[in-house]
Image: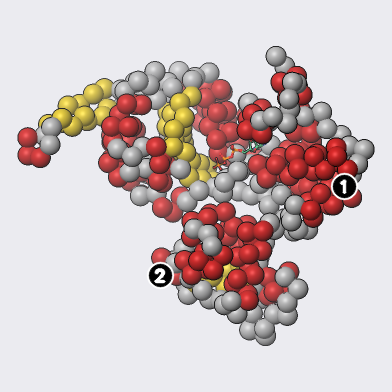
Amino acid sequence: MSLDRELVSPDPEGDEQAIESALRPKRLGEFIGQSRVREQLSLVLESAVRRGRPPDHVLMSGSPGLGKTTLAMIIAAELGMPLRLTSGPALERAGDLAAILSTLAEGEVLFIDEIHRMSRSAEEMLYLAMEDFRVDIVVGKGPGATAIPLEIAPFTLVGATTRAGLLPAPLRDRFGFVAHMDFYDVAELEQVLRRSARLLSLELPDDGGHEIARRSRGTPRIANRLLRRVRDFAEVRTEGVITREVAAAALNLYEVDAEGLDRLDRAVLGALLRKFGGGPVGLSTLAVAVGEEPETVEVVAEPFLVRQGLLARTPRGRVATASAWTHLGLVPPPDAVGAAAQPVLFDDPAAS
Ligand SMILES: Nc1ncnc2c1ncn2[C@@H]1O[C@H](COP(=O)(O)OP(=O)(O)OP(=O)(O)O)[C@@H](O)[C@H]1O
């Protein structure tokens, strides 16, 4: 079945997950943006194919929805190898990982999403597997425990993390290629949207695409999601064409503002300004104030707010910039961090 038919029949509204996966680019040539990562990766892959050997292990870091899973699938496709998917939280015990590693075929690509959330014992097993293609199976407990070495087939590990800083150095150092995925610019997101609109048979004039792209928080997954919400609006309330006005009206309805900030972003900024006078405030306190987990605030909201120059991470805690005050229609205090000032970008545990 062609991709178009798969998407338009019999029930295209039925399964958003299926649509999202159908919209994934399948080969490196279709992958939009991240030009440096694409070029570097294509060299790594091509030389591996020429040598007939699995390429070095690949680590990808970046915010959620920037295309890490998509790229892992592309790596396997470009190598012509199967892909096995798992995630850090699923590898609670070393045995969970051993069960996967011992059944990998030669050259297979193993993708571990959220690799920073793997258990310590699984992590230690992975060191040996990555380096020597071997695992030690421990039999028995206490002083009588014995490690039985088990050869595994040479494979390529692709790890993805939203928080590269949390990966222990011994693990990070075992990756031969590290790809830092950045937020996409508006023109790149317009390209993503044009491609998705074509696959979904939607009419998306350039001005409509531009309006959705600039509200997509630099993230393809959000661009595709907003496109689906705007499509709903266009189909129900208008003739179906996604003009700039239609896109703006739909996104206002879904509480995505002109800069792309959503409810969580505005809640974080609102709490920072109204409850803490613009900061500095620690991450955990801020998270409690908005009723979210610290990790959600830190991984989902903050990177975009920092990039937009609305929030700064400082050694003393999170601070709102002057632009944050104006964005929420408030008057910045005279000592607010200037919007032009460079935010201090580092994570200080003392500030959390
Ligand atoms: N470069 C790209 N070009 C076109 N579409 C893309 C690109 N990157 C991502 N997408 C789209 O965005 C969606 C999300 O991508 P993906 O699931 O790979 O992100 P992710 O970084 O793995 O996110 P998470 O870490 O939250 O799982 C995909 O369905 C895909 O269609």
**Residue tagged 2:** 350
Find numbered disc 2 in the image and state the secondary structure of the residue it sits on. helix
- Image: 76 above or below 288: above
Find numbered disc 1 in the image and state the secondary structure of the residue it sits on. helix
Please report the residue visible at 52 percent of the width from the left and 25 percent of the height from the top: 76
Amino acid bearing label 1: Val
Foreground mark, 1 or 2, reads: 1
As rendered, which of 232 and 39 lies closer to the eye?
232
Q: CA distance from mark 1 to mark 2?
A: 46 Å
Amino acid bearing label 2: Ala
**Residue tagged 1:** 246
Q: Residues within 10 Å of mark 2 (few under 14, many from 20)?
A: few
Say if mark 1 contacts mark 2, CB within 8 Å: no
- If the picture is divided into quarters, which one holds ligand 1? top right
- Image: 98 above or below 332: above
Q: Is residue 187 visible?
A: no
Mark nearer the N terminus (1 vs 2): 1
